[in-house]
Image (spheres, grey):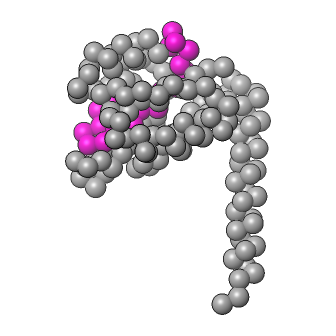
Amino acid sequence: MSKVGIIMGSDSDLPVMKSAAVVLKELGIEYEMTVVSAHRTPQRMMEYAENAYDQGIRVIIAGAGGAAHLPGMVASLVPLPVIGVPIKSSNSIDGWDSILSILQMPNGIPVATVALNGAKNAGILAAHILATSDPSLYQKLLKYKEDMKAAVLVKAENVENTDF
């Protein structure tokens, strides 16, 4: 099975980024996770990106806060889908700097961008991308959606049966 690479600019991003790993594991998707800083370890970032395909990685989830250059820089190096996760970090301008840095990519360098701290959705989007060529994963995602629907219906019933 194809792998997903989960990278982040700092280990301080791990509390957010682990949500991607959890959902990928739940769906049975192999992944790897590491720290790759666009600013502090640019050579490591370049090596990671340039070797990703040969390592079996088919989608990269890149989380970054502040200036948030990691997703865009990785996307500039390889033609793999890159999903950017803007992270509200300690040096962030309420997260807007990260959102705009990842979202406002120039033509030719696309980065799919999820919500601020939205690593879970990044994991689900990575699964959707992989499911286009994996019928078994496609079926797992259909079940995932049915399970979400069932959970909402239970909550709706609980609310409807609450007497104030």
Which image quarter holds the N terminus?
Answer: top right
The residue segment tinted magenta is: 53-70
Is residue 54 a member of the stretch shown in magenta?
A: yes
Residue 158 visible, this orientation: yes
Which image quarter holds the C terminus?
Answer: bottom right
Q: Is residue 36 left or right of residue 151?
A: left
Q: Nearer the viewer, residue 79 or 161?
A: 161
**How far across and down, in percent of the image, does residue 8 sit?**
38, 33
What residue is drawn where x is 76% and y is 58%? 150
Q: Is residue 113 above or below residue 96?
A: above
What residue is drawn where x is 26% and y is 49%? 90
**How far across and down, in percent of the image, does residue 7 sit?**
42, 29
Is residue 109 a member of the stretch shown in magenta?
A: no
Q: Is residue 20 above or below residue 34?
A: below
Q: Is residue 131 above or below residue 151?
A: above
Residue 100 visible, this orientation: no
Q: Nearer the viewer, residue 16 or 129?
A: 16
The tally of labels here is 0
What residue is drawn where x is 22% and y is 47%? 91
**How far across and down, in percent of the image, does residue 93 sit?**
24, 52
Q: Is residue 98 left or right of residue 7?
A: left
